[in-house]
Image (cartoon, rainbow, N blue to C red):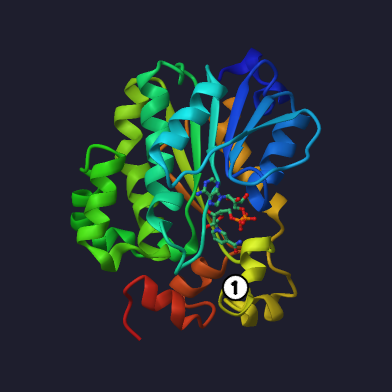
Amino acid sequence: MSGSNIGIDAFRFDGKRALVLGGASGMGAAAAEILRDIGAEVIVLDIQDIDLPGVKVVHGDLRERQSIDDALAQVGGPIDALLCAAGVADDTPGIEKANFIGHRHVIDSLFASGSLPRGSAIAMISSVAGLGWEAQLPRLKEYLDTPDFDAASAWVQANPDTATYGWSKQAICAYVQRQAYEFLRRGVRINSIQPGPTDTPLARAHAETWLGFAQDYRDDTGIQAATPAQQAYPLVFLCSAAASNLTGINIINDAGYVSSGFTGSYDAPAIRMMLGLEG
Ligand SMILES: NC(=O)c1ccc[n+]([C@@H]2O[C@H](COP(=O)([O-])OP(=O)(O)OC[C@H]3O[C@@H](n4cnc5c(N)ncnc54)[C@H](O)[C@@H]3O)[C@@H](O)[C@H]2O)c1
């Protein structure tokens, strides 16, 4: 964007349509509310309901290909901003589909129907749990090479150790970085955020592991777990024209815990382990 075009409107979504997968709760719901308030027409695709005035809800289950296809037929196009915010925790049947394969199917379907116009953007939610994905890249590529929903599901069935939360989030990180070039040729950007502990219904349901993570760091720095809005604002930003040169990036949004653990300015053995660092 050059001189005379600079302005706050680049952060707004007037006249744009946004689709939020998993927008009925937590970070996705916060993103839907923000998007509505800054001008977007917002559609939420979720298995749950949300009562958010001005936001349309379309029911769909990201674990079922047909359910996604039926939902997308109701959503229509174009989609200027696609936010992939649905997710479930370890030990949930179909986790690989709810967390990644279903989202990828939505992206592929929107491209196939010409519903992602040039200038549109995709923002996914990975996790700090996706750290260390680079070391897994050869195997992740094998997974990402699966051409479609059914092939990816079959791959996970054949590789049952990958039906995990961590793998699904590593897959998002690798997918984002790997697809940036191809999507940009079609005028579409793709990024993700990697949240640290965030106070949502999902995290509360797994409070000991999810909200216990990095508690020492938060106590030391005098902060709380993130709010859903603290994740949603950057997610929305990534889809805005203000981020038009950003693509292929996974933004760690964890109040600096990973950075501090990586550089050793804070003692975070879990981070060093996830990053494959010694000691
Ligand atoms: N809360 C955290 O601490 C944390 C940390 C890192 C990453 N994340 C990720 O953030 C994202 C948002 O999670 P959240 O914490 O806001 O949880 P949440 O449970 O509040 O929201 C997740 C939404 O996804 C929907 N969903 C789940 N399975 C679905 C399916 N099969 N089809 C359609 N919709 C489905 C749920 O109904 C819900 O509305 C998830 O991808 C999660 O893995 C969360």
Towards the viewer: 22 or 7: 22
**Residue visible at 49% across and 19% down?**
119
Quadrant in the picture for the C terminus? bottom left
| 195 over 4 or under it: above or below | below
In the rendered image, residue 19, in percent from the top left (x then y), is placed at 58, 31
**Residue visible at 63% across and 75% down?**
207
In the rendered image, residue 34, in percent from the top left (x then y), is placed at 73, 37
Query: Would you name the residue on which mark 1 appears?
Result: 206
| 19 over 144 or under it: above or below | above
- Residue 202 falls in image quadrant: bottom right
In the rendered image, residue 244, in percent from the top left (x then y), is placed at 51, 27
| 140 over 49 or under it: above or below | below
Q: Assess disc 1: are there few (<14), some (14-19) or many (≥20) residues with their C-alpha within 10 Å of its C-alpha.
A: few
**Residue visible at 35% across and 21% down?**
112
**Residue visible at 25% across and 61% down?**
136
Residue at the extreme bottom of the image, as rendered: 279
Q: Is residue 40 left or right of residue 102?
A: right
Quadrant in the picture for the N terminus? top right
Q: Amino acid at mark 1?
A: His
Is ligand 1 closer than 8 angstroms to the Cβ of mark 1? no
Q: Is residue 137 left or right of residue 101?
A: left
